Image (cartoon, rainbow, N blue to C red):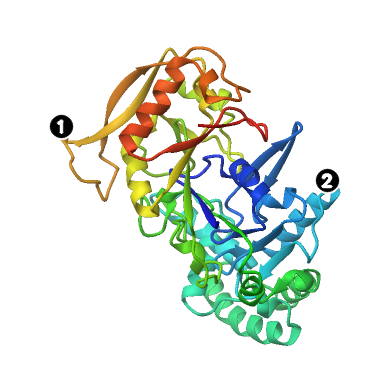
Amino acid sequence: MNIAVIGLQWGDEGKGKIIDYLSANKDIIVRFSGGNNAGHTVVINGKKFIFHLIPSGILRENKICAIGNGVVVDPKVLLEEINYLKKEGINVSPENLKVSLYAHIIMPYHRAMDAIREEGLSKKIGTTKRGIGPCYMDKVARCGLRMADLINPKIFYEKLNEVLQEKNILFERIYGKLAFSFDDIYKEYSYYGKLLKPYVCDLVEFLYDNKKKSFLFEGAQGTFLDIDFGTYPYVTSSSTLSTNALLGSGLGFLKINKIIGVAKGYTTRVGEGPFPTEIKDKLKDYFLEKGKEFGSTTGRPRRCGWLDLVLLKRAIILNNVSSIILTKLDVLDNLKKIKVCVGYKKNSKILNNFPVDLSEIKPVYKELLGWNTSIEGIDKFYKLPQKTKEYINFIEEYLNCPINYISVGEKRFDVIKK
């Protein structure tokens, strides 16, 4: 059975832990979108592992992890991640890590452009300034560089020279910035290409040869950061939906049997953009502290809010979700009352349809009683407090979608099967 794991909110739903958990029974784990603006965290025996490009399934023995064509790769960051994992005693080699020839690479001018655009906008997007957006821009504009170019010195020389001439005109004449040195970039990135070459392959051919194995597709960010269906323009620059899993991997010959949506027991987002259920009083500090809600990529404090079921129902439709994994439910342990958004209103009128723009939306809440006791480490659903089970069942009934697993702590096996 092939499974895709998708974030149902604005990212940071705890997908890294879930992918690590599910990968125990899968052969190949494939990342299909985004770049090193994403961050997945896994805690094993008290040791925290943070991933930005490599699927967290790399922590499992005898698994193959792949970075697909839909991902934009910063070669330096990828090499740093490989070296970091090796130092931690994790096996990372060309045998268990594959990178698509067709994946586009992030260059220094992409990061510079990202910063210039963010600083010049009247309405900030909240980008990580890692160059992800400008890299996707060049991909669509057909002037991008791919891993296939990076590992071929002659082709890389020719393409970089051509691209840099255009980029330097733009940076010097339009932005008043210093030109980029061709020699410096070529020398640095040729070195990266030499080191990464053993990992780079025709991923389509490799995965086709292994098509009888079981696959786990790793989504990055969350549904409402999708370039088309997210809270535009406060979104990422790629498709985060399940429908992109095959396209971003080159695996059109496969069938995804199950799509699992991951959602927190509350809601968070990083950066700018509308957030109907955002908590702005002192209670937000409780979520920040209890949930350790700081970005694994940027370290920025996340904005926190109550669970938005209207948002989740939309995400289930967009991704054709089969079942849900509810995470970080233990963060709600100390709350006597918990709010859940069950409707939207605008100008005092209840909305019947999901709005294109969430900026002026007010939530309609249902208030539930909290369980006011710790559930961390509980291993069976029947052992959960009655109010916890009622909260889970309420979510399940509203969404008309089964919740099969509940995460009740940050440890690897703090997962309950419902």
The x, y position of residue 3, in whole percent, is 53, 54
Decide: is 229 above or below 298.
Answer: below
Q: Nearer the viewer, residue 118 or 169?
A: 118
Q: Residue at x 67, y 73 (%)?
A: 206
Quarter holding residue 313 = top left
Quadrant of image for the N terminus: bottom right
* Lower sequence index among marks 2 and 1: 2
Mark 2 falls on what kind of element? loop
Amino acid type, callout 2: Glu
For mark 2, does the 10 Å Cα neighbourhood hold few (<14), some (14 to 19), or many (20 or more) residues?
Answer: few
**Residue 175 visible to the viewer:** no
Quarter holding residue 278 = top left
Decide: is 142 above or below 112.
Answer: below
Q: Which residue is mark 2?
A: 88
Q: Which residue is mark 1?
A: 348
Mark 1 falls on what kind of element? loop
The x, y position of residue 286, in whole percent, is 51, 21
Q: Is residue 144 left or right of residue 90?
A: left
Amino acid type, callout 1: Ser
Q: CA distance from mark 2 to mark 1?
A: 55 Å
